[in-house]
Image (tube, rainbow, N blue to C red):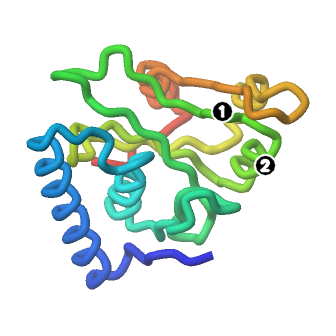
Amino acid sequence: MSYIDCSTEENRIRVNQIISRLKQGVDLATELEISNLLYNEAYVALMIANTLGHKFNIETQGESGDALDAEDNPVEYKFITKKGDNYSGCSFQFHWLSAEKIARYQLCSHFYFAWRDGFVIEKIVCIERDILMPEIIAKAGADGSTAGHKSFGHARIDKLVVDGYATIVYP
């Protein structure tokens, strides 16, 4: 596996330059009415890794999570995007829940849930894997297929914080 270490100042500066230029590209594309310029929004996972000082996994379909945390544990990122001036109707998605995907999530120590407004991360919540895995596993595809899907509304994640099962790690 190859990672970009976002805990070093030099790399953080370079990643911030990448993020700034991605925004410029999206803005230019929007002016030309080009949508979906950046497939699967991998730049958002990079933004989250950079915000948290994690090591970003450049292999988006790799065997482990989206990044490594400070202790080199694989972690998974999920995010929602503000619509208008709020997050109404937004939910965090766990797609294609095959046996392989479940096994990948089992390798992760934590899930990180990020709220973003365009290129600005507004909040990140950290939840231990075992808090949500029973619900994710229950929605896995039959016989290991990719048909499974589980979503968590943002209010549900906020309630886990209130109840002491999750932690706001940013801001």
Asked whether disc 1 touches disc 2, contact meaning CB atoms under 8 Å apart, the reply is no
Picture quadrant where residue 54 is located: bottom left
Q: Nearer the viewer, residue 140 or 24?
A: 24
Give the residue at mark 2.
103
Q: Nearer the viewer, mark 1 or mark 2?
A: 2
Q: Amino acid at mark 2?
A: Ala
Local secondary structure at mark 1: helix
* Residue 47 as seen in the image, left or right of residue 148: left
Is residue 1 found left or right of 137 in the rendered image? Answer: left
The residue shown at (54%, 57%) is: 66
Q: Residues within 10 Å of mark 2 (few under 14, many from 20)?
A: some
* Residue 146 in the figure: left or right of residue 66: right
Residue 143's disc is none
Q: Quadrant of residue 150?
A: top right
Q: Residue furthest bottom?
A: 10
Q: Position of residue 49 (x, y in %)?
A: 40, 61
Q: Is residue 69 above or below residue 155?
A: below
Dot 1: within a 10 Å radius of its alpha carbon, few (fewer than 14), some, or many (20 or more) residues? few
Residue 132: mark in rendering: 1
